[in-house]
Image (cartoon, rainbow, N blue to C red):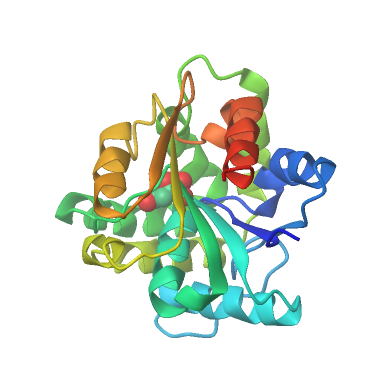
Amino acid sequence: MSDPWVLLHSFPVDRRMWSAQCEALAARGHTAVALDLPGFGAAPRMTREPPSLDGYVDAVLSSLDALAFERVTLVGLSLGGYVALRLAGRAPGRLGSLVLADTRAAADSPEARAGRVLNQGLVRSRGPAALIEKMLPHLLAPEAPESLRATLRAWAAEQSPEGITDALLAMRDRGDATAALGAIRCPTLLLVGARDAITPPAEHAAMGAAIAGSRVEVIEGAGHLSNLERPDAFNDALLRWSARP
Ligand code: MLT
C-alpha cells in the first residue's frame, strides 16, 4: 500500500488548483488529498503571530494527524513548496517522499521583500483581484490559454485579503532554506516548468544537486504554474514517480 499523497497549493489560490492531479492519482488507486493552507479557501487564518511558514506547517501536521496519515508523499508548488521544505526540516519522519514543484530554497532578495510590502498595500487598498492582475504575466507561459487566466482571476478574487497579507508576510520572512536541502533523506522529485519565470529551472537544478539522490524533471512548455498549464505532463511525472523502483 503506497503512502497517501498530500498536495499544498501556491499563492494566492487554494486547493482547487490540484483537482486534475487528485483525479489522476485517484484513478490509479492512490489516496490524494489537497489541503487549503491557513487563510486560503475554506481554512481559517493561522493563529501564529506574526504569520510564518511554521504556522502553515503546524496546520499541515494537524491535518495529517486528523487524517491518520502517518507518512505521506508531500507535494508542494511554489508557496506550497516553501511549506513542504520547512516541514521536511521539522518532521522528516512524516515524509515517505517529497515533490517540490516550481519553488525555491533561497530567501527573498531585498527587492522581493520590498515587493511583498507593496503587495500587502495593494491587497488592502484594491483587493486580491488587483494582486492577481499584477502577478498573472509572471505566473504563466505567454501561450497559456485565456480560460486559465480567467480561472486564476476567479480563484484569487475569492481569497480573503487577510489570508493573502498573512502569506505575503510569511513568505517575506521565510529565510534561506538552502542549508536544509542537504539534510533531506527521503526520495525527492523536483519538477519545474521550462518557462517558469519566477522560480526557473536553473534553481531546481541547483536544489537537485544539493539533495542526495533527487531527480529533476522539466515540464516543457509550462511556466510557473506547471500543474495547471500542462496537467497531463505533470500527472505523468507524478505517476512515474510513484512507480519508481
Ligand atoms: C506562488 O506561486 O506561490 C508565489 O509565486 C510564491 C512567491 O510569491 O514567492
Horizontal arrangement in the rendering, residue 128 relative to residue 179 (left or right) = right
Could you tell me which quadrant the N terminus lies in? bottom right
Q: Which residue is found at the position 47% from the left and 60% from the top? A: 124
Front-most of residues 43 and 63: 63
Q: Is residue 149 visible?
A: no
Could you tell me which quadrant the C terminus lies in? top right
Q: Position of residue 223 (x, y in %)?
A: 45, 28
Answer with the quarter of the image where residue 81 lies.
Answer: bottom left
Horizontal arrangement in the rendering, residue 197 relative to residue 26 (left or right) = left
Which residue occupies the extreme top position in the image?
143
- As displayed, is residue 102 above or below residue 140? below
Q: How many marks?
A: 0
Q: Which residue is found at the position 46% from the left and 71% from the top? A: 87
Q: Which residue is found at the position 26% from the left and 34% from the top? A: 202
Front-most of residues 2 and 36: 2
Q: Position of residue 47 (x, y in %)?
A: 54, 85
Answer with the quarter of the image where residue 179 lies.
Answer: bottom left
Q: Is residue 73 visible?
A: yes
